[in-house]
Amino acid sequence: MFKYFFMLLASVPMLTTGVVTAANQSYSALHLQQVADDVYAVIGPFGNRSPENLGNNATFGFVVTDEGVVLVDSGGSYKGAQAIDAVIRQVTDKPVKIVVNSGGQDHRWLGNGYFKEKGARIIASTAAVADQRARQQDQLLVLGNLVGPEGMSGTEPVYADETFDESMSITLGKKTFALSKVGPAHTPGDSLVWLPDERVVFSGDVVYVGRMLGVLPYSNAKHWIEAFETMAALEPVGIIPGHGPPTDLEGARADSLDYLVFLRELVGEFMDGGGDITQIGTLDQSRFEHLVDYATLKGRNAQQVFQEMEWE
C-alpha cells in the first residue's frame, strides 16, 4: 500500500504558484502536490516567517468535494490566506466552504478572516481556540516584526465558529472527515483530520518531515508520542504533515516519532547520571543532524524536555 502511495505521488507533477501578485504584494511560491483523488497538500517553505512567505512557513492542505472545498489550516496572515486560495484555484473554482484549524500555531489560523469573509465555516478544537486566544497577541507581535506591517495588512484574529472537545465528524459533498483532538503535542489543541475512505490524514504539527520539530514551552513531548501513536493506529496510506512534503508512516516515524523517543531517552539518561540543565547542550543529537533547523533547535528541544521531565 505504501508503494502505491509513493507511485501516486511520483505520477503527479509538482506545481507551484509561481509569484502571485495581489494588492501589490508578491507571494513566495507554495508547492501543490496531489496525494489522492481530490486531496492535495500545499507545501510552504522551511525557515522562519518572512515578508516573502507571509507567515506560511508550514504545510496546508485541502479536499475538493461536489459541494465545495474543505481546507485544513488557513495560513499565517490575511494575505497568506489569499496565497493559499490562489493555489486552490489551480485545481478548482469551487469555494472554500469549511476551514479546519489543526492547532493553535499562527499559521494554522490567522488566515481565518479571509475565508470567513467568503462565507466559510471555521472549525477547531476547544483547546486550540483557547491556545489561540492565549497567544494571539504574542503571535501578532512576532509576525509584525518578521513579516512586516505590509505583509500583515488585513490580518485580524478570527476564531472558530464551531468547536469540539475531543472529536467531531463532518460531511461535505459525500466526503466524510473525522476530526479528533490528540494534543497536547506541539500545541495544546493539536488535531487530526482523517479521511477514512481515502485513508489519508492531515496530521497538523503532530508530524514534521525533513525539518526538526520544535518542543516549546506550551508543548508536551511525552503526550506528543501518544498523539503520534493515535494517528498511527489509523493505519493511513498517506500523511499530510504540518511541515514538509507528504509521507507515509515510515517517513513520519523517522523524522518525528523516532526523534521524540530518542530525545526523551537521551535526556532521561542524562538526568539519571546527575547531569544538570546547564550542561544540556553537550548531548549528542547528531543522529538527526540531517533535519533542517537541527543546529537551531536541538539545544532548545533538549532543555525543554529536561524541564518537562523534572516534573514527571
Image (spheres, helix red, strand yellow):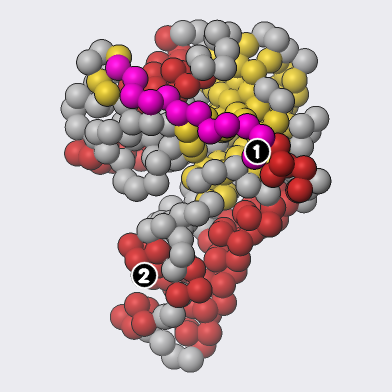
Residue at the disc numbered 1: 9
- Residue 278 locus on image (x, y percent): 31, 80
- Residue 145 locus on image (x, y percent): 19, 39
Residue at the disc numbered 2: 299
Classify mark 1: helix, strand or loop. helix
Q: Residue at x 66, y 35 (%)?
A: 11
Disc 1, disc 2: CB below 8 Å? no
Q: Residue at x 75, y 20 (%)?
A: 175
Could you tell me the amino acid type at mark 1? Answer: Leu
Residue nearest the observer in this picture, 120 or 91: 91
Magenta-highlighted stretch: main secondary structure?
loop
Residue nearest the observer in this picture, 160 or 102: 102
| Residue 148 figure quarter | top left
Quick check: can you spot residue 161?
no
Badge count? 2
Q: Is residue 124 magenta?
A: no
Q: Is residue 26 above or below residue 263?
A: above
Q: Left or right: where does residue 150 sit relative to residue 100?
A: left
In the image, the segment drawn in magenta is: 9-21
Quick check: can you spot residue 237?
yes
Q: In the rendering, which numbered label is found on residue 271?
A: none
Q: Is residue 11 magenta?
A: yes
